[in-house]
Image (cartoon, rainbow, N blue to C red):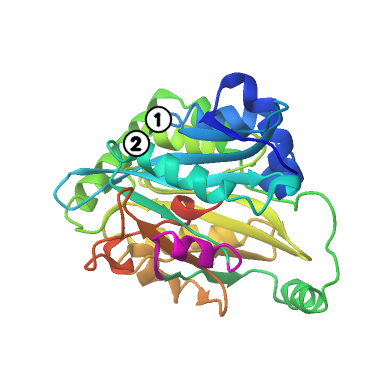
Amino acid sequence: MGGELTYRGLEPADVPAVLELLTASLAGGPTGRRSAGFFDWKHRENPFGSSPGLVAVAADGRVVGVRLFLRWQWRDGTGRTVRAVRPVDTATHPDFRGRGIFRRLTTDLLEQVSGEAELVFNTPNGNSLPGYLRMGWRELGRVPVALRVARPVSFARGARAALARRPGPSGPPRCELPSAAEWLAAPDAGRAARLAELRAERERADAADPRLHTVRTAAYLAWRYGAAPGLDYRVVTVERGGELVGLAFGRPRRRGPLAEFTLAELIVRPGDRAAAGQLLRLAAASGCDHAATHLAPGTEAAAAGLRAGCVRAPRTGMVLAARTPAGPLPAGRTLADWRFSLGDLEVF
């Protein structure tokens, strides 16, 4: 289909058309439905800032391409904030594919953020990775996922069904853990103080780690796990002697025939492997077939993982790719420079 295309910034009035385009290209996303409320939560209420976005508009006024960068912030071992963006939510109308819309939107948006971000990162799948590599991204490696099987018979049955490509049940899996939204939204004074103390202890310990990491501020936790529409995050806690010594967030989800508890975030007092192990076991016992998480090297969770029954899952994980807005990533930057939680990289 011919006609000139106009490239411009994403405007609030474009959101309905953008949601329709994303749905047609990428289906319903992690919640099964692309709503304006989810879009606003993700791109407008993010404590790191609103997402910059561009659209391609056809001569008849239709939005036929869209590209957004989700803002993020890492902290390094010196306490410096590293501002970053993550390419997300990109789509091109089928009638306009092959006209360079994806590349144009991406390069224009990189230029737009070049003065305010120093890092661009994402986790492309096997289909999209070659295109990113051609545009200057560098593949840094695979971030592995560990599994803790809770119901061996059900897990084995589901794994066989998955290999046979048999569909799983509809609807979310059962989960016995309390809602993260309710836990975060209405804490009593004592709980709020215990949470603040745990976060402060964790932040002091993390400051000595030279790897890039996300600072788990109260605002970040409330946005990421308490306010996410339709993602149904749950909370796991460990208390000892009246103190909060461990906290985790995750969500039940379908992985084909399997019921998985995706453990996105785990926070424990420095050195408390026992609390980390207890959180891993409680997450696995949530009512799902298994729990899945990333055990970052050198963390309490990694040290406790084997004893808690976690094993690295073969052929799983996410490929991390990155660049700077202006060009290639410095040669010295490697996957070992990050300390991830699954919540940092989970597609949402």
Q: Magenta segment: does it hold 137?
A: yes
Sequence-wise first label, 2 or 1: 1
- Residue occupied by mark 2: 217
Q: Is residue 218 above or below residue 84?
A: above
* Amino acid found under the numbered disc labelled 1: Gly
Locate the N terminus and report the quarter of the image it occupies: top right
Residue placed at 56% from the left, 49% from the top?
A: 102
Q: Is residue 314 visible?
A: yes
* Amino acid found under the numbered disc labelled 2: Thr
Q: Is residue 227 visible?
A: no
Q: Is residue 310 above or below residue 48?
A: below
Residue closest to the eye, 133 or 168: 133
Q: Magenta segment: does it hold 151?
A: no
- Residue occupied by mark 1: 49
Picture quadrant of residue 257: bottom right
Crowd band around label 2 with a 10 angstrom C-alpha radius: few (<14), some (14–19), many (20+):
some
Between the C-alphas of marks 2 and 1, the distance is: 14 Å
Residue 28 horizontal/vertical position (percent): 73, 44
Q: Magenta residues?
A: 126-140
